[in-house]
Amino acid sequence: KATDISSAVKDADMVFEAVFEDLKVKQEVFAEIDGNCSQRAILCSSTSGLSPNDIGANIKHQDRMMVTHFWNPPYLVPLVEIVPHDRLSAEARELALAFMEKLGKVPVVLKRDFPGQIGNRLQHALYREALYLIEQGVADPADIDKVVLASFGPRFSMIGPMEYFDSCGLDLHEKVQSYLYPTLCNAPEPQKILIDNVRAGNLGQKSRRGLYDWSNR
């Protein structure tokens, strides 16, 4: 058991960073990791959205730098999104991929660095539209959750959205998108309902109130 970075990483073959989502802090941590790890160590960040190129901008061993985003809770959710640094070597990528598979995870390697990776972009598109429906007086949070849990939630546990997309027929989706897309939320910034709640101290479960009242739950 180590209490400092240098002793923790000196003999490690793989290093996983899991500090909070602050680019400057992550850069400082990786600079220390890079200066104390072995020449063979693979360097991984658990970030769910920051760029491995930004996180590893100041390290020497960029050929061994990547993001390995374990989805929470990792003991239940198998996905790991692997995002390569632009200078990542093929050898380091394959070693990381093999290690994740050995752990029983389901790794997906992105073809290139992209903000929010795959999963976060998909779920935040859903969050944005859900908040928009609340703001527009269409439904309350509980009904939105019911719709997801009783429809495409269970559906997408068995079939992926792109496979389902093909199964319905692209011509059908073209027709639906032609009238639906113009009405979808395209907010470029955090939405008012979110900002208002944060400013009021309603942060969700941890503050006992958010979109739901958690005081008796």
Image (cartoon, helix red, strand yellow):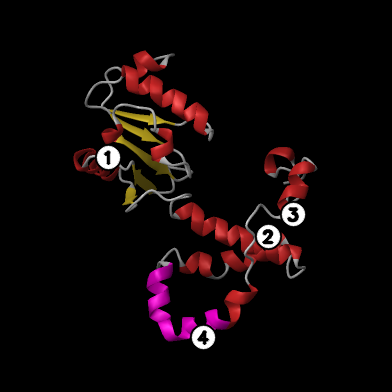
Q: Position of residue 213 (x, y in %)?
A: 76, 49
The first of marks 2 and 4 along the sequence is 2
| Disc 4 target residue | 175
Q: Position of residue 190 (x, y in %)?
A: 66, 52
Q: Position of residue 21 (x, y in %)?
A: 53, 35
| Disc 2 target residue | 131
Could you tell me the amino acid type at mark 1?
Answer: Leu
**Magenta part of the protein: which range?**
161-178
Front position in the image: 107 or 20 = 20
Label 2 vs label 4, nearer the camera: 4
**For the residues bearing labels 2 and 4, Cβ distance under 8 angstroms:** no
Secondary structure beneath disc 1? loop
Label 3 vs label 2, nearer the camera: 3
**For the residues bearing labels 3 and 2, Cβ distance under 8 angstroms:** no
Using a 10 Å C-alpha cutoff, classify the residue at mark 4 as few (fewer than 14 neighbours), some (14 to 19) or many (20 or more): few
The first of marks 1 and 4 along the sequence is 1
**For the residues bearing labels 3 and 1, Cβ distance under 8 angstroms:** no
Task: Let me know if residue 198 appears in the view.
Answer: yes
| Disc 1 target residue | 88
| Disc 3 target residue | 192
Let me know if residue 174 is in the magenta part. Answer: yes
Secondary structure beneath disc 2? helix
Q: Position of residue 44 (x, y in %)?
A: 36, 34
Label 1 vs label 4, nearer the camera: 1
The residue located at (66%, 65%) in the rendering is 144
